[in-house]
Amino acid sequence: MMRRMLRGLAALAATAAVLTACSDGDEPQADPEATTPSPQPQATEPPRPRPGACYRLSFQEALAYTSDVRPSRCTKPHTSVTYAVGRLDNVVNGHLVAVDSQRVKDQVARACPERLGDYVGGTLAQRRLSMLRSVWFTPTVEESDAGASWFRCDVIAVARDDHLANLTGSVKGALDTQEGRDRWGMCGTAEPGTAKFERVLCSAEHSWRAIEVVTFPDGRYPGEKAAAARGREQCRDAGNEAAEDPLDFQWGYEWPTAEQWRAGTTYGLCWVPSEQ
């Protein structure tokens, strides 16, 4: 029997830059001979996104916190679909909170993943075993100042490292069927933890597949040693059950690092060869 203990879960998370302002302390003096600048046009509130809209986003554009990519026809190649549009809760004690504040970012980072299952279907474990992911966008600071207060949730499929898949056909309810889970499932090009391993869609050429989720109690990161130990027996049993020969089989286990835990990846994955 062969065992492979692995670590390092890939996590796809939206990130945004934190803007800060500083002052020299002295007010600039006006030049009486300077030409008075023309007034700048006022920003207008952008159109509210609509559920069902399709976009052709790059991998990096999908990671951005705001987006100026225009919708495209859903009959043409596209990499994301808007599955939910919500309203920002950015008023605290009667005061408007900045759209790029951590409070607003945390709100959207909770709301969009929670709504993903209503669109793509499947159980939480089945969604974690797939390459379908949720990304989210808010208005820019200028758009928020003009009155925009929405957030937008899109579903994407990670094809491989730093690449998105075209969402051909509908992904609505895709994980409710075995066909959909096979198409959008998480697989690997080689044994996880080896140099040739790359995470890919199961509809692409592959030799390993993620088949079970290892759950952890809520709370703080349990530590590297405890995380590594938690899924060993479960993944070994999963590999045994998937093998044709219970005396000769392979299995793998990935557990989250502390950094990935903080980013929301609070589970591990069991891997087995596609055919063994």
Image: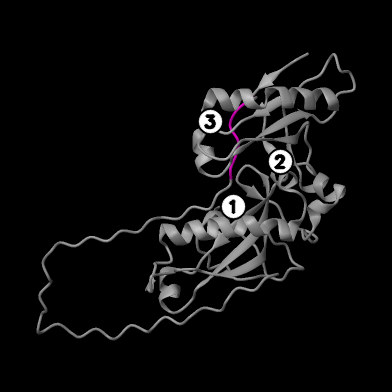
Helix, strand or loop for disc 1? helix
**Camera-side residue of 43 and 124:** 124
- From this viewpoint, is residue 148 visible? yes
**Camera-side residue of 226 and 159:** 226
User: Label 1: which residue?
Assistant: 59
**Camera-side residue of 161 and 53:** 53
Please report the residue visible at 77 percent of the width from the left and 55 percent of the height from the top: 121
What crowding class fits label 3: few (fewer than 14 Cα within 10 Å), some (14-19), or many (20 or more)?
some
Residue 227 position, x and y percent, is 58, 28
Q: Is residue 194 above or below residue 56?
A: above
Label 2 vs label 1: CA separation? 14 Å
Return the disc, 3 or 1, that comes first in the chain's sequence.
1
Residue 118 position, x and y percent, is 72, 60
Q: Main secondary structure of the magenta part?
A: loop
Q: Residue 201 in magenta?
A: no
Left or right: 223 as drawn, with respect to 252: left
**How many marks are shown on the rendered structure?**
3
